[in-house]
Image: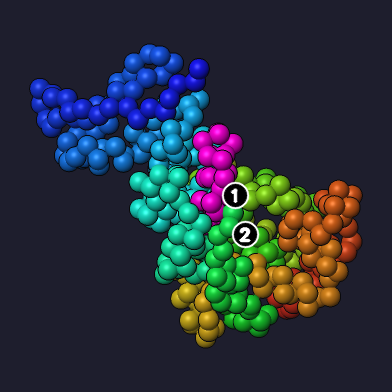
Amino acid sequence: MRQRFQYGSLRLKSRQKGDQVWELRYYVGGERKHATIGTLGEFPSESTARKSPKVQALLAAANADSPLVGGAITVGVLIARYEKDEMPGRYSTSSSYRSYLDCHIKPKWADTLVSDVKSMAVEQWLNKLELAPKTKSHIKQLLHVVFACAMRWELVERNPLSLVRVKGGSKRSERPRILEVAEFGRLIVKLSDPYRTMVMIAGALGLRVSEIMGLQWGDFDFENRTVLVQRGVVHGRVGEVKTEYSKDHLPMDSVLARKLRQYRRKCHPTKEGWLFANPATDRPYHQEEIVKTHLKVAAKTAKIAGKIGWHTFRHSYRAWLQQSAAPLAVQQELMRHASITTTMNTYGAGAMTDSKRLAHSKVVEMVFPNLRKAGAA
């Protein structure tokens, strides 16, 4: 017979020095366990101590094989187990998820019994949030994933998020900024290195900023003029690229190769061979600070209107590929997006075709029109 869902008991325990501490008592496999949760100063009441992430995580683990008792389990318990067992390993993804959980989902739903989570209540809450529709959609999707995990754990029988709709969730709150080639040229000259070379790579290869920060000199094959995108760096943390399609070899035009060789002679050297290492730390720069202190200032000086960020260059690169008359399949491969068709993905991905080199070179020629005359690298 399976054990009933347990909630554990909390009691205050005195110490020789300092505040009293809350202690949780619970069972695992029939064996009684004790865990210190925190001081009375940190949690002034039993209810606040019970809401702590540590209590939620311990009870979620203790009840891994237990059925629900009348659905009497809180959303906070589900979230604690999700954070412990299911949170994605990629840092940029997990940090976004934790932000959604801590700032929006937990404050509203952590103390709510899962049996009391109704589709319309969630929908009304989401639509009242003062956030962009796309962000609301991301929050809804994360909560949907948490309940999907709960179904797999046999803690709930249905996912209330399946029926929830977010107004305008599939639409952007504003259209992405696309730079004209002339605007990109004006921006480049207002930047100094290493930021100029970062933006040059963003415009000529369409890389995500995490991929730019993750570049090492060993990724470049100057003889065959290719670069392998194989890692990303977010907030100084090295991790995998966004998707399996993101890890790929890309062509490197002779103009771009020459500019990179010139930059290599003056960049800050590191043991790992980072292209863009902060001299103070020998680690890759944090991209957000560069936007504030360099990109926005350069855009203003160059009289470029509109919101400029790192993803502006990726959107612009896609538009420039279109202007270069590159076939859609070639655009897909250079952007390293998910495949247009399974056949294209299975039999065509990864090949350094002449069409990919031609499309890439046309973009480089557009954004660096005066450098072609200088000759090949």
Question: What mark, if any, has residue 208 been given in the picture?
Answer: 2
User: Residue 19 placed where, x, y %?
Assistant: 13, 32
Q: Taken as a whole, is the magenta stretch helix, strand or loop? A: helix
Task: Report crowding for label 1: few under 14, some 14 to 19, many 20 or more residues within 10 A (C-alpha).
Answer: many
Which residue does the image show at 45% across and 54% down from the upper left? Answer: 100
Q: Residue at x 59, y 54 (%)?
A: 162
Q: Is residue 271 magenta?
A: no
The percent position of residue 70, horizontal first and vertical second, equals 44, 36
Q: Which residues are magenta?
A: 139-161
Marks 1/2 in contact by CB < 8 Å: the verdict is: yes
Which badge, 1 or 2, comes first in the chain's sequence? 2
Relative to 358, residue 281 above or below = above
| Residue located at (66% from left, 81% from top) | 180
Residue 232 badge: 1
Q: Is residue 98 visible?
A: yes
Q: Residues within 10 Å of mark 2 (few under 14, many from 20)?
A: many
Q: Nearer the viewer, residue 199 or 37?
A: 37
x 68%, y 64%: residue: 206
Q: Amino acid at mark 1?
A: Gly
Q: Position of residue 191 (x, y in %)?
A: 53, 72
